[in-house]
């Protein structure tokens, strides 16, 4: 059964509107009977939990879309059952990004959202090039050479191929901004042209264009400090690296982006809600990034014909997230508690995987969202919608007394019980 929802514009008589609706329904009905039920849908996502939740979570001009009907229901691959990766296939659209170039800034390992976005774009055929922070560039190159195992596998069974790695320090927009301390730093030895302008110039010389610009980087040197204890320097550094860098990247990459391209950044709910422990001005930087997304969508849209969106992702045990507040020997990290909190309180009580964000980014780069720009897309299992959390100690006595429908499905341990049952 299907439901058709129509909104009647002002000035159009109801009768005329209904005649148009009937025509649409007739066309939809004709399409529906031409596809067998077994062909219309694939098997539901299958999620396996062989590792800890934190470990699993760390695991032309416009893209061409073609109608493609699956020949048979698809079962979850063995890799999905082992790692928790969601291997759902779309029966309706085949996203083809062949010939497109994606520049992903901020990739340094296989545990973060930037890597997951690169994988999903590569699955669709895009050429992947990345910008990596110079101090960890050698380590990342070693990892690529060795291979990242299951974390690097594409849908076709091959390892993700990064065509080229560019040194990129988003704290510097031009060569003139690079300070002497950085130049003398041995971790930058032998590298040059790692400012944003120089990096963009090298990318243009090598590829001529960038269809998709992914901003997956942030840094707050005083992130462990409460906002009240954050210095001016720490606050401005967080804003510079985490928010202004997006503006600078669009300044220098925008002119080479074909019309219909897409620019995406990553934000966090701390931009609009209080998240104790996420300090050093990082919450302010994310709020700036979200505000800038709206303005940049207007300016870059009118100037270059590209879309600008941001994804508000839930907590993930990436290398950068673990570094916010690392636990001592035998202790859990701050991010681990954030993940558990989300599983206990989200409308969808399950872990958030990096591929969830990767697939959303893929959609935002495709023609499926050709009219979507200036938005903040939440990918957090619904946590952003919550006003009261069910694992609150203040409500424990009340919640413990509740039973039956719907409370049996509202208890904070529902998500963990599901995980335990699937191990």
Image (cartoon, rainbow, N blue to C red):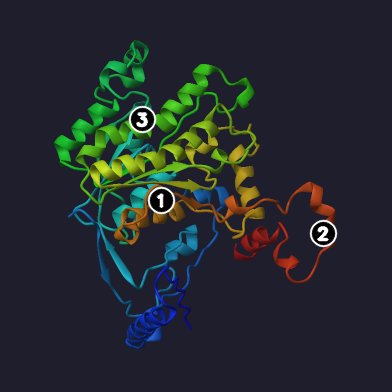
Tell me which residue sits at (31%, 34%) in the image. Answer: 249
Where does residue 394 sit, x and y in percent of width and height? 81, 47
As rendered, which of 296 and 335 lies closer to the eye? 296
Question: Cα distance, mark 2 to mark 3?
Answer: 49 Å
Tell me which residue sits at (50%, 36%) in the image. Answer: 287
Residue 394 horizontal side relative to residue 19, left or right: right
Where does residue 202 sit, x and y in percent of width and height? 19, 32
Task: Please tell me how crowded label 2 is: few (under 14), some (14-19), or many (20+) other residues with Cα within 10 Å.
Answer: few
As rendered, which of 233 and 324 lies closer to the eye? 233
Q: Are marks 2 and 3 in contact (CB under 8 Å)?
A: no
Sequence-first tag of 1 and 2: 1
Q: Say which quarter of the image contains residue 124.
A: bottom left
Q: If the image is split into quadrants, where does the C terminus sit?
A: bottom right
Q: Select label 1 or label 3 by which is in front.
A: 3
Tell me which residue sits at (54%, 28%) in the image. Answer: 281
The answer, for residue 382, to whether it is visible in the render is yes
Where does residue 261 sit, x and y in percent of width and height? 26, 49
Where does residue 376 sit, x and y in percent of width and height? 46, 48
Task: Please tell me how crowded label 1 is: few (under 14), some (14-19), or many (20+) other residues with Cα within 10 Å.
Answer: many
Task: Please tell me how crowded label 3 is: few (under 14), some (14-19), or many (20+) other residues with Cα within 10 Å.
Answer: many
Q: Which mark is residue 151?
A: 1
**Circle 2 SS class:** helix
**Circle 1 SS class:** helix
Residue identifier under label 3: 133
Residue identifier under label 2: 400
């Amino acid at each position: 059964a299907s439901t058709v929802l129509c909104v009647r514009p002002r000035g159009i008589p109801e009768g005329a509107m209904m005649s148009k609706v009937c025509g649409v329904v007739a066309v939809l009905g004709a399409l529906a009977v031409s596809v067998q039920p077994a062909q219309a849908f694939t098997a539901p996502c299958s999620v396996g939990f062989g590792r800890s939740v934190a470990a699993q979570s760390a695991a032309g001009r416009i893209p061409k879309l073609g109608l493609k009907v699956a020949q048979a229901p698809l079962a979850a691959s063995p890799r999905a059952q082992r790692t928790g990766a969601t291997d759902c296939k779309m029966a309706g659209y085949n996203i083809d990004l062949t010939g497109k170039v994606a520049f992903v800034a901020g990739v340094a390992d296989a545990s973060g959202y930037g890597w997951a976005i690169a994988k999903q774009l590569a699955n669709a055929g895009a050429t992947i090039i990345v910008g990596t922070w110079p101090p960890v560039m050698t380590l990342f190159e070693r990892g690529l050479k060795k291979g990242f195992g299951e974390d690097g596998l594409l849908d076709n069974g091959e390892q993700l191929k990064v065509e080229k790695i560019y040194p990129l320090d988003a704290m510097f927009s031009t060569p003139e901004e690079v300070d002497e301390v950085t130049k003398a730093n041995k971790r930058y030895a032998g590298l040059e042209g790692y400012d944003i302008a120089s990096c963009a110039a090298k990318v243009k010389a090598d590829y001529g264009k960038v269809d998709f610009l992914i901003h997956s980087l942030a840094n707050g040197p005083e992130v462990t400090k409460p906002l009240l204890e954050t210095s001016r320097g720490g606050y401005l550094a967080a804003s510079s690296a985490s928010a202004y860098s997006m503006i600078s990247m669009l300044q220098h990459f925008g002119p080479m982006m074909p019309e219909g391209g897409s620019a995406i950044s990553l934000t966090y709910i701390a931009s609009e809600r209080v998240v104790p422990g996420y300090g050093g001005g990082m919450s302010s930087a994310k709020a700036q990034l979200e505000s800038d997304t709206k303005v940049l969508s207007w300016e870059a849209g009118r100037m270059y014909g590209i879309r600008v969106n941001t994804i508000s992702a839930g907590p993930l045990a990436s290398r950068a997230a673990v570094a916010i507040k690392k636990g001592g020997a035998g202790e859990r990290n701050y991010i681990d508690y954030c993940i558990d909190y989300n599983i206990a309180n989200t409308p969808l009580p399950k872990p958030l995987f990096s591929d969830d964000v990767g697939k959303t980014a893929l959609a935002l780069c495709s023609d499926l969202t050709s009219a979507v720009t200036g938005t903040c897309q939440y990918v957090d299992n619904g946590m952003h919608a919550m006003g009261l959390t069910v694992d609150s100690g203040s409500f424990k006595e009340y919640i413990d007394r509740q039973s039956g429908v719907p409370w049996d499905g509202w208890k904070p341990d529902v998500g963990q019980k599901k995980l335990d049952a699937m191990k």
